[in-house]
Image (cartoon, grey):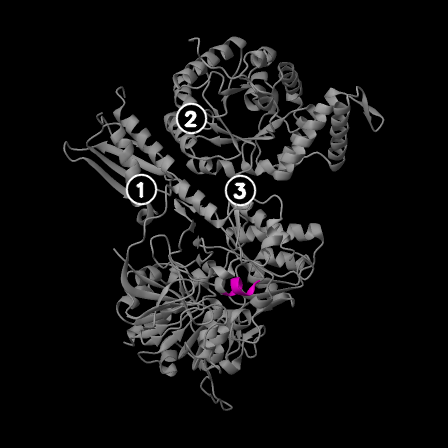
C-alpha cells in the first residue's frame, strides 16, 4: 500500500477499496468537483398509487439488488426499529454485499452485527456507536467503514461520492401521496433534517410509517415530489421511549457545572456575547449546563441573540421563548418540548443537513455561528480532537456535527474533564484525528483552560481575569502526573477498517483493526 | 507475611477499585486477575501498582481479583494495602 | 523531648488566612478526594470520622494517607478530621496521617483543656518520630457538647497549634435538647460564645455546616448571619454550597473603596509619622485598619473565586 502524509501528520493510503483518497490539506485545499450528482427522473401519472402494504413489497418495488447502497435516518435514535426490520428482510431475500449509509448507527442496531458477519452488509458509511462499531474494529466488516460528519454526509450524497440507490425513511406521520411529517404520531421526533439529502438525491425513496393520514398532511418536512412509495405497516417503526427523553436534566456534578461556567466566561471574554449573538447547543451534560448559564448571563447583560442552533433541547426552546434568541435553526430535536416547539412556534425552523452543514453549498448555517461548545474523547497538544475511537482503540462514536461546527463557528470551545476514569483526555497524540486542531480555539477543563495560539481571539482571551490559563502541554502534564504517566500505545493490526473523512471529502485519518 | 483469610477492600463506585485477595497455593506466586476500562493503556501500570504493594508485605503466593472502575494509582495502592492488611490480621 | 528539637510557632498568617469555606470530603470516596482541589473551597477537610462507616475506617485512613502523599492539591489548604480521642481509631489515624503533613488536624468532640494537651502531646510525638519540627501540624477543634462550650476559652487557649475553633451543629443541638432551625436561634448563644473564646485566644472561628444541600435560601440566610457575628468561614458538606458562601463573604464596592482609602491614609500617616488620622471625618485607629485589611483580603479572594 502506498501512503501520503496529510497536514495533521497522519499517513493516508493513496487508494483503498478501489477509492482514490485525497489527504486532508487544510481549509479549501483540494480539488473540488464542479457539479452535484443528479437523481433518477421519475414520472407519476394521474391515478397512480404510491401506497404499498409491506416492507417485502417495498423491497421488491425498489428493485434492490446485491451490491447496492441503502440509507436510513437516525432521528429515532435509541428507539429505531426500522433499520433492523428492513435489513432482516433484505437478508431473507438473499441480497448480499450491501453498502449501508444511514445518518448514524446506534447501540439499538446490535442485531446488524450478524448481517455484517454474514456478508449481507459489506461496507458502511456513517458514524457508528455501539456493537456494530465494535464488530468493525475487530475486522468483521469485509469492506470498509467511511466515517463522515453530518455535513460531510450531506456533501457526499449531493456530490455523488455516496450514491444512494434506495432510501428508507421512517416517517412519524405520512400521507398516501408521500408528504412526510416529523412532529405528529407515536414516533414524533422533530425535524427529519438528516434525511433531506437522501430524499432529494437517492434514486428510490421509500417512506415507511405507522401513522398514515389522508392527503395532504400538514407540517410537511419532506415533500411528495421526492417520495416514490409509502408503506404503512403495523409493526412499530420506532419505540417512542427511545426516541426522546421527557425532559433533559441539567447535571448536578459540580465539576461539570464549573467547566460550563468557565465556558460562559470565555464566550463573554471573546467579545462575541452581544446583540445578534448565535450559539449551538448540544444535549450533553456540560453543553446543556452551558446553555443554562449562558441564558442567565444574557438576561443579566440584556442581550438579544439572533439564533440558537440544535440538536434542540428544552433549554434552547426556553431561550427562544424568553426572547434571548429570535429563532431556532434545528436539524434534530432531543426532547418533547423541542418537538412541540418546532410544531407550534413559527420561529423554530427545521432545516436539512445540507442547509445545516454542507461545505459544498451556497450557505451552511454553521458558517454564521458565533460559538459552539463541543465535547471530545481525546484532545492532543496540537488541539486535534478525537471523538470516534475509545482508549482501547475501538470505534465507538460518530463525528456528528463536530467537524462542521468547529470549522464554521467563529469561536469553538471543547469542554471536558481532564480525565475519564484513569484515561487522560489531553495527550501527546490523539489515537484518531476526527476534527483538525486548526479548528479548535479553546479547550476548557476542570484543571485549567488552554487557548490555541492560532485562535484569533487569543490576545483578547488571555487578558481575561479569573480564568486559570495554561498551555495545553501543561494540562497534558497534569493529566499524565495524575494517572502515572503517558498511556501505553494501543496495539493495532495493519489492516485499515475505517477512514475518517473531513467534511470536504479529504481524509483526516484511518482506523486500524484492534489486536486481540 | 501470610494471607490468613480472603479479604476485600474498595468498591465498584466510579474511580474506585474492588480488590479481593485470597490465599495462593505455595509456589504459585502473585496471580492478578484485572478487569479495567483502562486495561489497554494502563493495565500494565495497574498490575505494577498492585504487585508493588504485595511485595512490600513480602507476600509470595496470593490470588488477587481486581475490578477497576477507573481508579488512580493512589486508590489502587490503598485498596490493595487495605485488603492485604485485612487478610493478614491475626485476630479475626 | 530532647533539647535539640525544633519548634515552629503559630504565625499571624496561620490565624488570618482567608478560610471562607471548609469543604468536608468523605475519606473513603476516591473520586471526591481526587477532585478536592477543583471545587474552589479555601480549605478541604478529609473526613475519617462521621463521613466514614465504622467498618471502613481502616480503608479510609489508608486512602487519605495515600492521597496526601501523592496528589497535588494546589492552593487548597488540606486538613484531616480524625476520630476522637478515646476511640480505637484515634492513634492509628494520627500515626498514618501526621507523616503526610496536612496543614491541620480537625479534632472532633473537643471538650476540655486537658484533653487538648493530651492530643497535642501525641501529635508532637509523631512529629518528632517523623523528623518534623514540633508544632508543624496545626489544630482546629470542633466543640460538640454543652461541656465543651462551657470550656471554650480554655480549649481555644490550650495550645499554640490551634488556628481556629468551630461549633458542631448537629451534636450540639442534640446535646442541648434543642431543635435545629434555619434561623439558628438555638445556636446563637453558642456561636457568640465561641466567637468570644476564639478572639480572646487570637484564633479564627468557623461555623458549622448547613445540612440541607438543596436549600440555598436557608444557606444564604445563615451565612449572612454568621458573617455579621464576625465568623471567618463556614463548613460545607456539598461543593455546590461554596460559591454562595464566597459571594456572601464578598464585601460591597463601597466597603472596598472605603477600606482602600483607610489603608492608603494609614500608610501615608505611618510614613510621615503622623499620630492621628481621619478618613471621612472619622478617626482611624488600629482596629479600623485591621478590619479594613480583612475587607481587602476578602475582596481579593472573592475576585479569584
Is the C-beta separation of discs 3 and 1 under 8 Å? no
Q: Is residue C217 visible?
A: no
User: Closer to the observer: label 3 or label 1?
Assistant: 1
Q: Quadrant of the C terminus of chain C?
A: top right
Q: Which residue is mark 1?
A: B45
Same subunit under labels 2 and 1?
no
Q: Nearer the viewer, residue C89 or A377?
A: A377
Q: Most extreme residue toward the front, as rendered?
A: C272
Q: Position of residue A263 (x, y in %)?
A: 57, 51
Same subunit under labels 2 and 3?
no
Alpha-carbon distance for marks 2 and 1?
24 Å
* Residue interval drawn in magenta: A404-409
Q: Position of residue B7 (x, y in %)?
A: 28, 30
Q: Which residue is mark 2?
A: C100
Q: Secondary structure at mark 3?
A: helix
Name the dominant secondary structure of the magenta segment.
helix
Q: Nearer the viewer, residue C166 or C187?
A: C166
Amino acid at each position: 500500500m502506498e501512503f501520503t502524509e496529510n497536514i495533521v501528520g497522519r499517513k493516508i493510503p493513496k487508494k483503498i477499496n478501489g477509492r482514490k483518497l485525497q489527504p486532508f490539506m487544510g481549509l479549501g485545499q483540494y480539488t473540488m468537483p464542479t457539479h452535484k450528482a443528479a437523481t433518477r427522473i421519475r414520472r407519476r401519472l394521474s391515478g397512480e398509487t404510491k401506497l404499498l402494504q409491506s416492507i417485502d413489497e417495498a423491497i421488491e418495488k425498489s428493485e434492490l439488488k446485491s451490491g447496492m447502497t441503502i440509507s436510513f435516518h437516525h432521528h429515532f435514535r435509541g428507539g429505531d426499529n426500522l433499520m433492523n426490520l428492513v435489513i432482516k428482510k433484505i437478508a431473507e431475500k438473499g441480497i448480499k454485499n450491501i453498502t449501508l449509509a444511514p445518518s448514524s448507527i446506534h447501540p439499538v442496531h446490535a442485531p446488524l452485527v450478524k448481517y455484517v458477519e454474514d456478508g449481507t452488509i459489506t461496507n458502511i458509511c456513517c458514524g457508528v456507536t455501539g456493537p456494530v462499531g465494535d464488530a468493525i474494529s475487530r475486522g468483521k466488516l469485509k469492506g470498509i467503514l467511511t466515517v463522515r460528519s453530518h455535513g460531510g454526509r450531506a456533501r457526499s450524497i449531493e456530490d455523488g461520492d455516496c450514491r444512494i440507490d434506495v432510501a428508507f425513511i421512517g416517517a412519524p406521520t405520512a400521507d398516501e401521496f408521500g408528504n412526510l411529517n416529523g412532529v405528529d404520531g407515536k414516533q414524533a421526533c422533530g425535524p427529519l433534517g438528516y434525511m433531506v439529502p437522501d430524499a432529494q438525491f437517492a434514486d428510490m425513496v421509500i417512506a415507511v410509517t405507522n401513522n398514515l393520514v389522508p392527503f395532504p398532511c400538514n407540517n410537511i418536512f419532506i415533500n411528495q415530489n421526492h417520495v416514490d412509495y409509502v408503506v404503512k405497516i403495523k409493526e412499530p417503526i420506532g419505540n417512542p421511549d427511545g426516541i426522546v427523553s421527557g425532559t433533559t436534566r441539567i447535571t448536578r456534578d459540580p465539576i461539570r457545572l464549573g467547566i460550563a461556567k468557565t465556558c460562559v466566561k470565555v464566550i463573554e471574554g471573546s467579545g462575541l456575547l452581544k446583540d445578534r449573538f448565535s450559539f449551538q447547543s448540544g444535549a450533553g451534560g456540560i453543553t446543556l449546563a452551558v446553555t443554562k448559564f449562558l441564558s442567565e448571563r444574557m438576561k443579566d447583560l440584556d442581550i438579544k441573540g439572533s439564533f440558537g442552533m440544535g440538536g434542540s433541547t428544552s433549554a434552547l426552546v426556553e431561550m427562544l421563548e424568553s426572547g434571548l434568541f429570535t429563532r431556532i435553526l434545528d436539524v434534530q430535536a432531543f426532547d418533547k418540548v423541542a418537538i412541540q416547539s418546532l410544531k407550534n412556534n413559527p420561529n423554530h425552523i427545521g432545516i436539512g443537513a445540507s442547509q445545516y452543514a454542507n461545505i459544498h453549498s451556497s450557505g451552511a448555517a454553521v458558517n454564521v455561528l458565533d460559538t459552539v461548545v463541543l465535547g471530545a474523547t481525546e484532545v492532543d497538544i496540537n488541539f486535534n480532537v478525537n471523538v470516534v475511537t475509545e482508549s482501547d482503540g475501538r470505534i465507538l462514536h460518530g463525528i456528528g456535527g463536530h467537524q462542521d461546527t468547529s470549522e464554521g463557528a467563529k469561536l469553538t470551545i471543547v469542554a471536558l474533564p481532564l480525565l475519564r476514569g484513569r484515561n487522560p483526555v489531553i495527550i501527546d497524540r490523539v489515537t484518531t484525528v476526527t476534527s483538525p486542531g486548526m479548528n479548535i480555539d479553546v479547550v476548557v477543563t476542570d484543571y485549567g483552560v488552554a487557548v490555541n495560539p492560532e485562535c484569533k481571539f487569543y490576545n483578547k482571551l488571555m487578558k481575561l481575569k479569573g480564568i486559570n490559563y495554561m498551555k495545553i502541554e501543561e494540562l497534558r502534564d497534569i493529566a499524565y502526573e495524575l494517572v502515572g504517566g503517558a498511556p501505553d500505545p494501543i496495539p493495532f493490526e495493519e489492516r485499515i477498517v475505517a477512514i475518517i473523512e473531513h467534511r470536504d471529502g479529504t481524509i483526516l485519518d484511518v482506523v486500524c483493526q484492534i489486536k486481540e | 507475611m501470610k494471607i490468613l483469610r480472603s479479604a476485600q477492600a474498595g468498591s465498584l463506585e466510579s474511580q474506585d477499585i474492588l480488590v479481593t485477595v485470597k490465599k495462593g497455593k505455595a509456589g504459585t506466586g502473585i496471580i492478578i486477575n484485572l478487569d479495567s476500562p483502562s486495561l489497554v493503556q494502563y493495565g500494565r501500570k495497574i498490575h505494577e501498582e498492585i504487585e508493588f504493594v504485595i511485595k512490600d508485605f513480602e507476600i509470595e503466593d496470593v490470588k488477587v481479583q481486581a475490578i477497576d472502575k477507573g481508579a488512580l494509582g493512589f486508590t489502587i495502592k490503598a485498596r490493595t494495602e487495605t485488603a492485604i492488611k485485612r487478610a493478614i490480621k491475626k485476630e479475626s | 523531648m530532647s533539647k535539640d528539637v525544633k519548634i515552629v510557632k503559630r504565625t499571624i498568617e496561620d490565624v488570618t488566612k482567608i478560610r471562607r469555606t471548609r469543604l468536608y470530603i468523605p475519606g473513603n470516596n476516591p473520586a471526591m478526594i481526587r477532585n478536592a482541589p477543583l471545587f474552589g473551597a479555601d480549605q478541604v477537610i478529609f473526613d475519617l470520622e462521621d463521613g466514614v462507616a465504622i467498618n471502613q475506617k481502616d480503608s479510609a485512613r489508608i486512602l487519605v494517607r495515600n492521597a496526601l502523599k501523592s496528589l497535588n492539591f494546589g492552593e487548597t489548604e488540606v486538613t484531616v478530621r480524625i476520630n476522637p480521642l478515646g476511640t480505637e481509631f484515634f492513634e492509628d489515624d494520627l500515626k498514618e496521617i501526621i507523616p503526610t503533613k496536612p496543614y491541620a488536624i480537625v479534632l472532633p468532640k473537643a471538650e476540655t483543656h486537658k484533653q487538648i494537651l493530651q492530643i497535642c502531646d501525641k501529635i508532637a510525638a509523631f512529629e518528632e518520630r517523623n523528623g518534623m519540627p514540633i508544632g508543624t501540624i496545626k489544630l482546629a477543634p470542633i466543640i460538640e457538647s454543652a461541656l465543651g462550650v462551657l470550656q471554650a476559652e480554655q480549649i481555644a487557649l490550650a495550645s499554640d497549634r490551634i488556628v481556629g475553633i468551630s461549633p458542631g451543629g448537629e451534636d450540639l443541638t442534640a446535646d442541648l435538647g434543642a431543635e435545629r432551625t434555619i434561623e439558628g436561634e438555638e445556636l446563637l448563644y453558642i456561636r457568640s460564645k465561641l466567637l468570644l473564646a476564639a478572639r480572646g485566644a487570637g484564633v479564627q472561628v468557623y461555623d458549622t455546616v448547613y445540612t440541607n444541600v438543596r436549600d440555598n435560601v436557608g444557606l444564604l440566610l445563615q451565612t449572612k448571619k454568621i458573617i455579621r457575628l464576625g465568623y471567618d468561614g463556614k463548613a460545607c458538606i456539598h461543593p455546590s454550597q461554596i460559591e454562595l458562601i464566597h459571594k456572601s463573604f464578598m464585601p460591597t464596592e463601597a466597603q472596598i473603596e472605603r477600606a482602600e482609602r483607610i489603608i492608603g491614609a494609614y500608610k501615608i500617616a505611618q510614613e510621615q509619622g503622623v499620630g492621628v488620622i481621619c478618613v471621612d471625618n472619622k478617626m482611624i485607629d488600629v482596629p479600623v485598619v485591621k478590619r479594613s485589611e480583612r475587607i481587602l483580603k476578602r475582596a481579593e479572594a472573592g475576585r479569584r473565586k
